[in-house]
Image: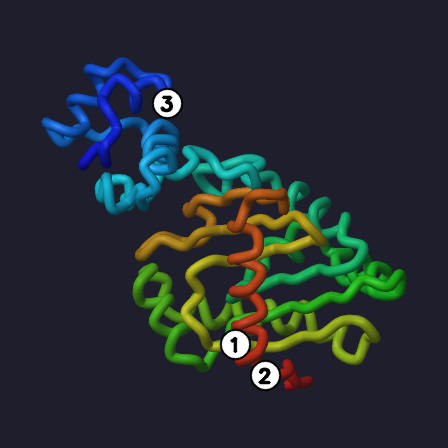
Amino acid sequence: MASGGWTHAALGDATGVDPKSVERWVNLGRTPRRATAMKAAERLGEDVHALWPSLRQARPARAVSPELVTLYEQRADVPVSTFVDLLGSARERLDILVYAAVFLHEAHPRLNERLKQQAADGCRIRIALGDPGSDNVQRRGQEERFGHGIDSRCRLAAMHYRPLLGVPGIELRTHGTTLYNSLYRADDQMMVNAHVWGVNAFGAPVWHLRRAEGGSMFATYAESFDAVWATATPLTEG
């Protein structure tokens, strides 16, 4: 860094630091704090990154997203009622992206009736289930050492949801994508069940998100759902 004709004392006065600190910037190549560096660059009429290239490094990320409500170590730690209540709170949009997630119907046999009522009240409902014949579903069964258990549960899930075919406001599709996360969205809240290689979904972590200003996680997962939905095909009577 060059002082551009400024004395160390004058630049120190202009930036509010000790002249000896300025001397260390100039002679030893030290880097001041970002705010001080910005002020010094302004006084010198220079680009701050030209003076101190190390400031190009990204700032440390926030330790915790403002959108994170709760983190669960395993899906098994989350009461099924938490999922059902979250989905039941949806008034405008309800999205589900899974391979099967038959635990929802097993724990709440009246789930379909609840979804029908939400749709009748104006909620748009989109449910994407795994295509049992797809390569990715078959591969997931092998990776989790669950064999045909995965594709059989996909068929069971489709059986549970088929009574909703043709209900206004409810769309059902199947997909064959690699399922990195199961998503359960209700308006501006979402449960994300992250998947771990070789681990059944009930043993993998879940985070509860709520859309918040300054956060981007919710939007990332919402866009992921839309991308999968665009590739999915309508569920048939079968």
Q: Disc 1 to disc 2, how far (Cα)?
A: 7 Å
Q: Are marks 1 and 2 in contact (CB under 8 Å)?
A: yes
Q: Which residue appears at 39% of the width and 39% of the height?
A: 61
Q: Are marks 1 and 3 in contact (CB under 8 Å)?
A: no
Instruction: Look at mark 1 in the image and give the residue it sits on.
Output: 175
Mark nearest the camera among 1 and 3 is 3
**Which amino acid is tagged 3?**
Ala
**Which amino acid is tagged 2?**
Thr
Residue 35, given in percent of the width and then of the height, sits at 38, 30
Residue at the limit of the structure toward the front, as seen here:
5
* Quadrant of res 169: bottom right
From the image, which quarter does the N terminus lie in? top left
Residue 145, given in percent of the width and then of the height, sits at 32, 61
Residue at the limit of the structure toward the left, as seen here:
28
Instruction: Look at mark 2 in the image and give the residue it sits on.
Output: 233
Q: Nearer the viewer, residue 178 or 56?
A: 56
In the rendered view, tell whether residue 226 sits above or below residue 188: below
Label 1: few (<14), some (14–19) or many (≥20) C-alpha neighbours in 10 Å: many
Q: Disc 1 to disc 3, how far (Cα)?
A: 62 Å
**Which amino acid is tagged 1?**
His
Judging from the image, the colouring scheme is rainbow
